Image (tube, coloured by chain):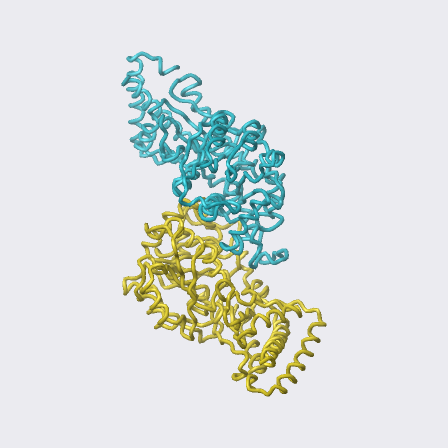
Chain colours: A yellow, B cyan
Amino acid sequence: MDYTSLSKEEIERLLSEQNRVLKEIGKKKIALDISRGKPAPMQLDGVMPLLDILGSDTVFPKPDYRNYGILEGIPELRALFAQILGVDKNEVIIGGNSSLNMMYDTIARAMQFGICGGQPWFGRKIKFLTPVPGYDRHFGICEHFGIEMINIPMTPTGPNMDLVEQLVSGDDDIKGIWCVPKYQNPTGITFSEDTVRRLATMKTAEDFRIFWDNAYVVHDLYEDGDTLANIMSIAKEAGTQDRIYQFTSTSKVTFPGAGVACLAASEKNIKDILSHMKYQTIGANKINQYAHLLYLKSAEHVKELMAAHAAIIRPKFDKFMEVMDEAFGDDSGIASWTRPKGGYFISLDVLEGCAKEVGRLCKSVGLTITNVGDTYPYGMDDKDSNIRIAPTFTSDEDLEAALQILVCCIKVACLTKLSSK
Amino acid sequence: MDYTSLSKEEIERLLSEQNRVLKEIGKKKIALDISRGKPAPMQLDGVMPLLDILGSDTVFPKPDYRNYGILEGIPELRALFAQILGVDKNEVIIGGNSSLNMMYDTIARAMQFGICGGQPWFGRKIKFLTPVPGYDRHFGICEHFGIEMINIPMTPTGPNMDLVEQLVSGDDDIKGIWCVPKYQNPTGITFSEDTVRRLATMKTAEDFRIFWDNAYVVHDLYEDGDTLANIMSIAKEAGTQDRIYQFTSTSKVTFPGAGVACLAASEKNIKDILSHMKYQTIGANKINQYAHLLYLKSAEHVKELMAAHAAIIRPKFDKFMEVMDEAFGDDSGIASWTRPKGGYFISLDVLEGCAKEVGRLCKSVGLTITNVGDTYPYGMDDKDSNIRIAPTFTSDEDLEAALQILVCCIKVACLTKLSSK
């Protein structure tokens, strides 16, 4: 049913019906949350054997991983991440528990010290390209450091590359672009090989950097997961390998907040980064790194671990599709959404001008969704259309209830809008 | 024996004798290291039960410590550190594994964002007071950020406070002072109550901060350890509580590099810090925090754990005193040293102009000592007199050998100097 072509009477009738449903929901004193991309408790239960890996009888490699040192992280784990990311092991730094922290610190270093001996960014006009909808914490870092953001619309193959190329070739103040290239947050889209190639080879300022947040590199939900082209290989062929800062972590492989994060970059970049990092720390938690090494074992074994996560998450994505397909189908004119094969998010677009109202209605009946607008820099979605759906944390039962509420709120908000035309 | 009052003939005779000893040592192909303040493997063996604390059957508190969140650290551990440091639990942030990292980040935030809404330090003339001899990594942070360091001589009661007060009252560019107030690195001196009081109450610029690196707060070696006055209590009475950033960690309680670090400050400062930190990370490793909570248990139990460390370290400090007393006594005129009751270091002063030569001679026969000069900013000890001794990492047997070599090198270097007068 195409809601946008209904008669005024039909709209009023449906709206009145949905308002009744919403009122009934409101009476139930619900408290549901599909706002953040957090693993479900059941997923974490599956990771608990990690805590049995080390014990008082563990014999650690030399130089003693229990003592100070090894700034760049333990070599075996660098090698494992290198394999997963398709880079050389000397191109990897293993950090603490948070890739966000490594991204923030990378920007902070550029602000303070410049990149590879270049001018510090502090006090200068610095711009970043921000594919939208995108990840709020990327935007938050830019906003906090006073970096201007230029929005680039996401397409089904990645950011609009015509626009990206045009902008970076003509403006040396543009120093970076944020990318979540696989199962993008929130669209779930994986950049096409053409997009990756164009990003790696386009003409840019000398100290331009691609912040390649490969957060979902191993986070397939279906057997036929997406394939992301290896940007580092393409860049090396083109001689642009210094352009890429790649990040990932095990936050959604083992424990969020207690995993290990990594930064991968060219040897020139790694040398530059370590030349600053050595003043910041003597090294990250190598005992946790070693526990992860023994738990993750190999790239193949990581795939097995991720299959266990997928078995829990996949039904939730499927449930979303099922409920939304039934409620709206393909041609409702008021709601459309992505169909990711991995990652943690689904991007939902509702009738323009209705997203904030959907958020408000959901909240009014006890359903917390991602703050509407957060998928855009400064929280400003000019179309007021995009909503990020994070279905992973909630139980299957609660998710079904949450989705029914969401459907009702979308209908009420959009029908209200249509009725006022 | 006062070496400085010996006859030229006697000096020549002793020098010739010591040169023979040194030559014999050189033949032995020794490789010893007393350069860094690292716990000995035997100490770390004693900490191994920490790795048995958590397992797949552990039930974590809510909100689920295994998942994202709790930026400021888990409440129980904040409370424990608050007790150890004598502050309120709301005045504590538990970070990752490294207090150095928290100090560096604190300076980096001040450079970028200023303190509590003040002007950023970037691009301005910023000066710090640096008690000397002091900790090389404090100096390294200042040097890296281009912060000018003004040396303040250490006295037996702490930094020369007359000089400190005079400088900070007249120069608003002075924004901080680095202090290791208990068992100072490298002197082992604990600041007197009068020193602590003067630091807390002196007249300073509005955004002046004391970087109170309380690294050795529980690191007594003898039962009658030093008592450090509670700077936060004194500051609260004086209304200067915003002046203090306090740091500590369990790097030398549990595992170096895999412990937990903390920052303690006034609620106003904590609020300011968290307002920036929230862009940097979603939170530190709470699983490691929880493991530490269960292992450390209480302030009383921490004392017991530290007694076990002391039992291993104390004989090494005693051995140093024994060897040096026998070799030089109180009136050699060429070597004097501190007698710390805790911490990880001893400060050794040799005849002026001879420290670098002692380092060179030690290295020539296979003994690595802390790089001479490192106890001063920019590596510049104008008197070329100070050497930091770090006796903890080496085995008792190796330490004895290392000290005999050190004694010989001191004698050769100083006698050579005296003979050239």
Query: Position of B58 compared to A298: left or right?
Result: right
Residue at (46% x, 68% y) in the render: A132
**Is residue A99 among what the camera can see?**
no
Given residues A269 and B223, the one toward you in this image is: A269
Total numbered labels placed on residues in the image: 0
Among all residues in the image, which is located at the extreme front? A421
Given residues B10 and B266, the one toward you in this image is: B266
Given residues A223 and A158, the one toward you in this image is: A158
Rendered position, B265 above or below A401: above
Q: Quadrant of the C terminus of chain B?
A: top left
Q: Position of residue A371 (x, y in %)?
A: 56, 65
Give residue A365's quadrant in the image: bottom right
Q: Position of residue A235 (x, y in %)?
A: 31, 64
Query: Position of B231 compared to B345: left or right?
Result: right
Q: Quadrant of the N terminus of chain B?
A: top left
Q: Position of residue B420 (x, y in %)?
A: 27, 18
Residue at (31% x, 66% y) in the render: A202
Residue at (34% x, 50% y) in the render: A119
Residue at (40% x, 17% y) in the render: B332
Q: Position of residue A25 (x, y in %)?
A: 69, 74
**Is residue A316 among what the camera can see?**
yes
Rendered position, A371 above or below B145: below
Rendered position, B295 above or below A255: above
Query: Position of A81 compared to A389: left or right?
Result: left
